[in-house]
Image (cartoon, grey):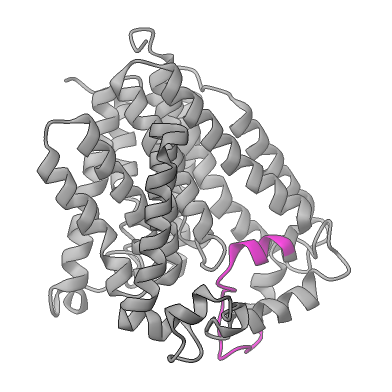
């Protein structure tokens, strides 16, 4: 298949989001790369792509959200930090719009997805083969970012399991990318993975998926109590049992948040309370944490939802939540409205991965890792919009 320039750029960009290339420049080098990629996407949309952007309610609400972030700069104590925050939010939008304009063929979607999976597989090798990661540091994003990236890759592999003849291969990939979050005991990614699987089957089977969803929920609860490392990390008191959970004797005060709950309360008292609707301004949280030694020197709040509320209030949080919900609804409708197998697969992957990744914003810095995390579900959604524009895909 002959690929044009935008298609090649898309495959390269989408496939390599997991690469950080953080050495030796650290986060500054990452910020430069992010800005350059955004310029390429914006320039490609204006001057190179021969197809038009597909506008739906999702990009429109997203632009309104970005406008609200810009408004937040006007009352922010640190507009410079606010600008950096906005850059990280712009990237998923540009990725989505570029994909909607560049992708018209299922083969491009599959090539981009498989390319991203190969890079993710390399990152697993770097993580689990002794000394490899230490010999060549900074190639991939941090473990938390990789684990969140694997949510989308796992769902993509699960989708290929149902829509290709390579059942065994894709089942192995699905299991392979589901395991790291359990091995690393990353609770946020575990929850995101389980939620994405439930969303996958809800899109695919609708009400008939309820027994599967119940099974996944039960499996998640059992994992908490029967995987020793996860049980130890989950609770303040390691003696808490499944029987106590079933009898209702366990609540959030028993959950070990690694002091995150205290940090969230501190940040909300400082930036959210009294400014509930509009927050204290875009970049307020980053400015405070970068310039003050708090909670052992942490620079990020480990909750994008908390940062959204503190920076841009309930208005910002609700707008962003609407974006995720609209993507899921659009993917659900698309899956059940089209017969084309490529569109069905892409909508299934986009909707399920979006919900799974969205959940992780509760207790991780997902927006900070936009290239590796948010680019995946938004990219799949953009490709779905592009595929729907091909008149042959009916």
- Residue 61 lies, with reference to residue 4, above or below; the image says below
- Residue 298 shown in magenta: yes
- Residue 52 lies, with reference to residue 287, above or below; the image says above
Q: Nearer the viewer, residue 98 or 375?
A: 375
Q: Which residues are magenta?
A: 290-309
Q: Residue at x 54, y 81 (%)?
A: 255
Please indicate whether residue 31 sits to the left or right of residue 278 in the image. Answer: left
Quadrant housing the C terminus? top left
- Could you tell me residue 83's position as x and y percent? 65, 57
Please indicate whether residue 195 sits to the left or right of residue 182 in the image. Answer: right
Q: Residue at x 43, y 52 (%)?
A: 214
* Identity of the residue furthest to the right in this view: 274
Q: Nearer the viewer, residue 17 or 203?
A: 203
- Could you tell me residue 200's position as x and y percent? 39, 41
Q: Residue at x 57, y 63 (%)?
A: 362
Q: Residue at x 13, y 73 (%)?
A: 129
Can residue 101 be seen in the rendering of this structure? no
- Residue 19 shown in magenta: no
- Residue 187 lies, with reference to residue 123, above or below; the image says below
* Identity of the residue furthest to the top in this view: 391
- Residue 134 lies, with reference to residue 208, above or below; the image says below
């Amino acid at each position: 298949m002959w690929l044009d320039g935008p298609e090649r750029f898309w495959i390269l960009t989408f496939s390599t989001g997991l690469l950080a290339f953080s050495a030796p420049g650290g986060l500054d080098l990452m910020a430069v790369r992010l800005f350059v990629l955004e310029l390429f996407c914006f320039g490609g949309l204006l001057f190179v792509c021969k197809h038009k952007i597909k506008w739906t309610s999702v990009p429109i609400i997203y632009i309104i959200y970005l406008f609200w972030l810009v408004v937040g700069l006007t009352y922010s104590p640190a507009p410079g930090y606010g600008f950096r925050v906005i850059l990280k939010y712009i990237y998923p939008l540009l990725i989505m719009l570029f994909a909607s304009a560049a992708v018209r063929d299922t083969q491009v979607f599959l090539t981009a997805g498989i390319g991203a999976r190969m890079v993710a597989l390399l990152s697993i090798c770097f993580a689990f083969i002794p000394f490899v990661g230490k010999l060549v540091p900074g190639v991939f994003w941090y473990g938390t970012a990789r684990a969140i990236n694997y949510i989308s890759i796992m769902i993509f592999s699960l989708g290929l399991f149902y829509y290709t003849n390579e059942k065994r291969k894709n089942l192995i990939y699905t299991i392979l990318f589901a395991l790291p979050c359990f091995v690393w005991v990353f609770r946020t990614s575990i929850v995101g993975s389980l939620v994405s699987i439930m969303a996958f089957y809800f899109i695919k089977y609708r009400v008939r998926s309820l027994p599967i969803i119940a099974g996944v929920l039960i499996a998640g609860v059992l994992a908490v109590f029967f995987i020793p490392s996860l049980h130890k990390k989950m609770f303040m008191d390691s003696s808490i049992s499944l029987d106590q959970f079933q009898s209702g004797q366990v609540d959030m005060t028993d959950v070990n948040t690694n002091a995150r709950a205290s940090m969230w309360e501190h940040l909300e008292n400082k930036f959210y309370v009294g400014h509930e609707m509009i927050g204290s301004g875009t970049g307020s949280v980053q400015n405070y944490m970068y310039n003050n030694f708090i909670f052992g020197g942490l620079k990020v709040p480990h909750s994008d939802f908390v940062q959204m509320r503190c920076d841009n209030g309930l208005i910002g949080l609700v707008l962003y939540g609407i974006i995720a919900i609209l993507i899921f609804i659009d993917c659900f409708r698309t899956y059940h409205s089209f017969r084309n197998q490529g569109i069905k697969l892409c909508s299934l992957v986009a909707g399920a991965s979006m919900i799974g990744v969205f959940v992780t914003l509760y207790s991780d810095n997902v927006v900070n890792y936009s290239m590796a995390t948010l680019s995946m579900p938004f990219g799949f959604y953009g490709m779905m919009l592009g595929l729907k524009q091909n008149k042959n895909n009916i």
